[in-house]
């Protein structure tokens, strides 16, 4: 009788353990959905998208946007760039992220469409011809129009063509573009660059370091 009771207890314990195992297996099955090739492909696409940053490159026509992209891409040739009539694109690889630079021409007919491209951008580059003093007020107006459209974007203002005669200095450019009025909550970087054909400057290295910092702090 004692032996039978022990057998019965053992069977009940085994049944309970089996039931618990079945429950855990079913629970695990529903928690871990079976991955189809389509699911895996979608997951990889999302992962790649998370590793990409789009940089929108804007500025008045003649500011030197294409030349700046040339230097960032390591193509610091002395070849002058023709004005961009539509779009220009380069991709910059870093160890943990890819930056897609989309440049849009700065002609009056294209400037009306600039704001339409802000929604997909992670960073805004605004290139200014530091030697063209007469157009600095227009550059300021266009920049602040963009800033008022999107209040979240980190902004890099590039005072280009610092090697040209009559180029404004950093403090003068700061005032001319009214950068002091930009909210302190927005990430803002002002850098000065030389024209295409000059050796890579310290500012370009600072720019790359700023981009890498934004990889790990996208907000």
Image: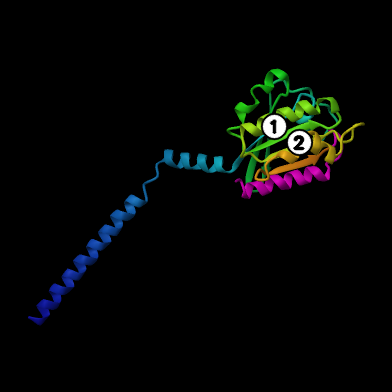
Q: CA distance from mark 1 to mark 2?
A: 9 Å
Foreground pick, 176 / 20: 176
Residue shown at 80% from the left, 34% from the top: 176
Task: Report x, y in % for residue 156.
Answer: 72, 39
Q: Which mark is residue 103?
A: none
User: Image height check: is 167 above or below 26?
Assistant: above
State if disc 2 and disc 1 touch (CB < 8 Å): yes
Taking the magenta stretch, the answer to whether it contains residue 47 is no
Q: Quadrant of residue 188?
A: top right
Foreground pick, 95 / 219: 219
Q: Which residue is mark 2?
A: 178
Characterize the local packing of mark 2: few (<14), some (14-19) or many (20 or more) Cα atoms within 10 angstroms.
some
Compared across the picture, whether 72 is left or right of 118 comes to right
Residue shown at 73% from the left, 44% from the top: 208
Q: Quadrant of the N terminus?
A: bottom left
Q: Quadrant of residue 5?
A: bottom left
Task: Report x, y in % for residue 184.
Answer: 68, 45
Q: Which residues are magenta?
A: 194-219
Characterize the local packing of mark 1: few (<14), some (14-19) or many (20 or more) Cα atoms within 10 angstroms.
some
Q: Which residue is mark 1?
A: 144
Foreground pick, 118 / 36: 118
Taking the magenta stretch, the answer to whether it contains residue 204 is yes
Residue shown at 63% from the left, 45% from the top: 97
Q: Quadrant of residue 20?
A: bottom left
Q: Is residue 73 visible?
A: no
Compared across the picture, whether 65 is left or right of 33 comes to right
> If you read the primary sequence from the N terminus, does the residue marked by circle 1 or circle 2 appear first?
1
Q: Is residue 26 visible?
A: yes
Local SS, label 1: helix
Residue that sits furthest to the top in the current view: 109
């Amino acid at each position: 009788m004692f032996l039978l009771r022990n057998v019965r207890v053992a069977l009940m314990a085994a049944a309970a353990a089996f039931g618990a195992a079945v429950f855990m297996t079913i629970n695990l099955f529903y928690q871990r959905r079976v991955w189809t090739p389509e699911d895996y492909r979608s997951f990889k696409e999302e992962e790649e998208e998370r590793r990409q940053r789009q940089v929108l490159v804007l500025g008045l026509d003649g500011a030197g946007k294409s030349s700046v992209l040339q230097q960032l891409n390591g193509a610091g040739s002395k070849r002058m760039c023709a004005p961009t009539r539509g779009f220009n694109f380069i991709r910059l690889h870093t160890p943990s992220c890819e930056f897609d630079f989309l440049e849009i021409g700065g002609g009056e007919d294209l400037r009306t469409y600039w704001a339409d491209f802000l929604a997909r951008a992670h960073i805004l580059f605004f290139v200014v011809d530091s030697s063209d003093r007469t157009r600095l007020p227009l550059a300021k107006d266009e920049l602040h129009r963009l800033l008022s459209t999107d209040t979240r974007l980190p902004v890099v203002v590039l005072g280009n063509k610092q090697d040209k005669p009559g180029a404004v200095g950093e403090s003068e450019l700061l005032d001319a573009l009214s950068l002091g009025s930009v909210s302190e909550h927005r990430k803002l970087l002002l850098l000065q660059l030389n024209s295409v054909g000059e050796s890579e400057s310290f500012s370009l290295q600072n720019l790359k370091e700023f981009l890498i910092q934004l990889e790990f702090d996208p907000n």
